[in-house]
């Protein structure tokens, strides 16, 4: 297939691009900068959709960016980065003479775990130094997914002829994983203790009350339809996923 990928230069996009190309698909990225196998969002908006079989949109500002305050400016950036890019794709698809047969919008997945980026990159050094621990009570759910499985689910959706609807991007064992369990498993994978919980007030101080609630309350999610669709997870269990990432 010829796949047009929005937001493909980031952590998840790079993994998905690599997987798609390894399976024989062509990938063109939509990003801020043009170049080889790339077009810009401005080109997409003005010139329309290039000939393609599938469209995937991964674009979106990281909601939990610890270096940005949750103020009106950042809030607008978070919404705009998702909504405006999706509108641009929707308009281009609607106006295309030969629209793609598949469109995948990636949003609301679990915490993406993988080497060289994502959530793990922010956690590794505190845990390596023995300073890691659960957030708040540690009892809150911690939905997670290995980056290879997130890329795999998107690829599976594109390659399946009649697949429609929502596929939750979380591992099968996420429902039984608490934040405290994750902290202990990560520490064990690194051969370190996880004795220092991060108090709730500190999480609120760094992220702001609204974003902190995402980390301190969590959400139980199960990949029921993902499994029913026939996708086989490479990393269904947390211990195996973490060993692969920190080995």
Image (cartoon, grey):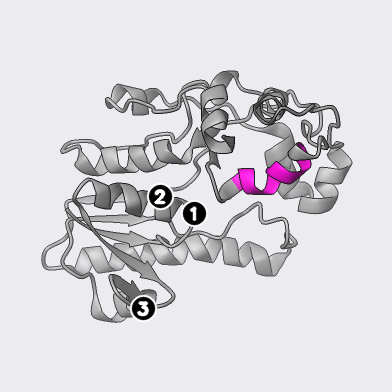
The boundaries of the magenta stretch are 119-127
The residue labelled by disc 1 is 11
Left or right of 45 on screen, residue 107: right
Is residue 169 toward the left or the right of residue 50 in the image?
A: right
Q: Could you tell me residue 149's position as x and y percent?
A: 41, 36
Q: Position of residue 1 (x, y in %)?
A: 16, 53
Question: Magenta includes 105?
Answer: no
- 203 w.r.t. 231: above or below: below
The image quarter containing residue 231 is top left
Q: Could you tell me which residue is drawn at 76 percent across and 26 percent down?
A: 138
Residue 43 higher or lower than 165, as above or below: below
Mark 2 or 3, which is nearer the eye? Answer: 2
Q: For residue 91, what is the image quadrant? A: bottom left
What is the x, y in percent for residue 8? 40, 60
> Are the residues at dot 2 and dot 1 in contact (C-beta closer than 8 Å)?
yes
Nearer the observer, 36 or 30: 36
Q: How many marks?
A: 3
- How would you classify the magenta stretch by its main secondary structure? helix
Q: Are marks 3 and 1 in contact (CB under 8 Å)?
A: no
Mark pair 2, 3: CA separation: 20 Å
User: Which numbered disc flags the more N-terminal residue, 3 or 1?
Assistant: 1
The residue labelled by disc 2 is 15
- Say which of 240 and 247 sits in front: 247
Residue located beneath label 3 in the image: 34
Packing grade of label 3 (10 A; few <14, some 14-19, many >=20) is some
């Amino acid at each position: 297939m010829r796949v047009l990928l929005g937001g493909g230069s980031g952590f998840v996009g790079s993994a998905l691009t690599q997987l798609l190309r390894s399976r024989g698909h062509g990938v063109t990225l939509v990003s801020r900068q043009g170049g080889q196998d790339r077009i810009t969002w401005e080109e997409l908006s003005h010139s329309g959709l290039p000939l393609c079989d599938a469209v995937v949109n991964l674009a979106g500002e990281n909601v939990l960016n610890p270096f940005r305050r949750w103020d009106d400016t950042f809030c607008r950036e978070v919404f705009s980065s998702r909504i405006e890019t999706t509108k641009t794709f929707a308009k281009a698809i609607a106006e295309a003479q030969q629209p793609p047969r598949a469109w995948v919008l990636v949003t609301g997945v679990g915490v993406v775990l993988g080497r060289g980026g994502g959530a793990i990159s922010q956690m590794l050094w505190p845990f390596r130094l023995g300073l890691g621990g659960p957030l708040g009570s540690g009892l809150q759910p911690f939905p997670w997914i290995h980056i290879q499985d997130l890329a795999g689910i998107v690829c599976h959706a594109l390659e399946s002829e009649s697949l429609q609807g929502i596929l939750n991007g979380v591992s099968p064992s996420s429902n039984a994983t608490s934040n405290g369990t994750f902290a202990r498993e990560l520490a064990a994978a690194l051969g370190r203790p996880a004795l220092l919980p991060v108090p709730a007030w500190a999480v609120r101080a760094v992220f702001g009350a609204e974003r902190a609630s995402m980390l301190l309350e969590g959400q139980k999610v199960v990949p029921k339809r993902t499994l029913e669709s026939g996708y086989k997870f490479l990393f269904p269990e947390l211990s195996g996923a973490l060993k692969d990432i920190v080995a």
